[in-house]
Amino acid sequence: MNRSFFFLACLLLLGCSSQVIPKIKGLSFVASREEVRQEHVDAVLDMHANYVAIMPYGFVRNLQEPQILFDTDRQWFGETSKGVRQYIQMLHANKVNVMLKPQLWIWRGEFTGSMKMATEADWKILETSYTHFILTFAELAEETGAEIFCIGTELEQFVLHRQTYWLDLIAAIRTTYSGKITYAANWDEYQDIPFWKELDYIGIDAYFPLSEEKTPQVATLLRAWEPWKEKIAQLSKKEKRRVLFTEFGYRSMDYAAWKPWTVSRDGSKVNLQAQTNAKKAIFKTFWKEEWFAGGFVWKWFMDHNLAGGIQSDRFTPQNKPAQEVIKDYYSSY
């Protein structure tokens, strides 16, 4: 065979076998009292999003409470199994993929990563309760064909103190659910997770501190991202897993990129440009990387016309300039 022809044939074969993996362009749905309607999904489609995170909640009373309450008639519709099923069915009917992401809420908004039991007996109760909670929704994820299932969100102390339990839980989930699975590690926790190789994605809630400036410029934020990006890329290479930002977002307020996890309502001043610049920087930093799978914007309310707005200092980008940044990037991938 002529060498030039052979070389050309090899190139064609490689070209045909290569596959561009689509980015996960996600929005994090806030559960509602009501069913999701077509008009709610239309707003998602208008953003060029191809994924939505559905987040049913389990509730605990305090950081040392081992019992989880969930799927009760006192919860909002979107937090229950019935609501989750309706949301997923409606999204799938519109060809929108789903990450089912059940997570815990501790009374008064205590940080879930600090939850730690005082006794071995309480640890066992928590493990039994959490297994029931998570497998209930893993079964629902399988039943509804949810494309990704998140096994936990920001549970640092639980993970570090009970590693064997988590390995057993992952095995149990694998026997129940056949899709992709991940765990949503907090930004300061992801390096210490011992079971990334057992999952399909390295999940990170990407609230990394970047700048103490009131309104940092995009160039400033890009420089601030570089050391974080290098560490994340190294972990991806080491674990041979792509990275998924299970949450990413910024409030539309002064100092939005300093402590992006801040939820306090005290003394915050609306700053739409700070949110917009931070959104641009995170897209410019990560979305071109092959090892980066994509992410889920925090957060998105179903009733789009009534959400956010230029007077809001909250996380949602809805009806703010940051919304157009997300839409532009999502449409280009």
Image (cartoon, helix red, strand yellow):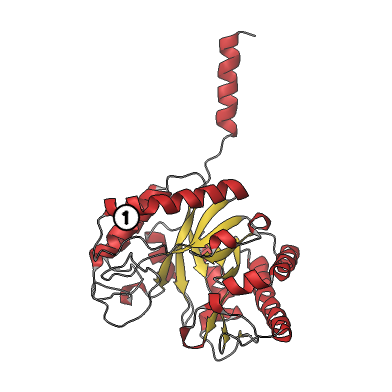
Q: Nearer the viewer, residue 185 or 82?
A: 185
Q: Going by the picture, which residue comes out furthest to the bottom?
A: 74
Q: Which residue is mark 1?
A: 221
Q: Is residue 304 left or right of residue 78?
A: left
Residue 225, how many percent across, how many down? 38, 53
Q: Is residue 310 something that shows in the picture? A: yes
Residue 249, how many percent across, how many down? 39, 65
Q: Which amino acid, mark 1?
A: Leu
When asked about the image quadrant of residue 253, the answer is bottom left
- Quarter of the rendering occupied by the N terminus: top right
Residue located at (57% from left, 35% from top): 18
Residue located at (66% from left, 74% from top): 134
Q: Is residue 56 something that shows in the picture? A: no
Q: Going by the picture, which residue comes out furthest to the top?
A: 2
Rendered view: 249 above or below 293 = below
Residue 211, how many percent across, how many down? 31, 61
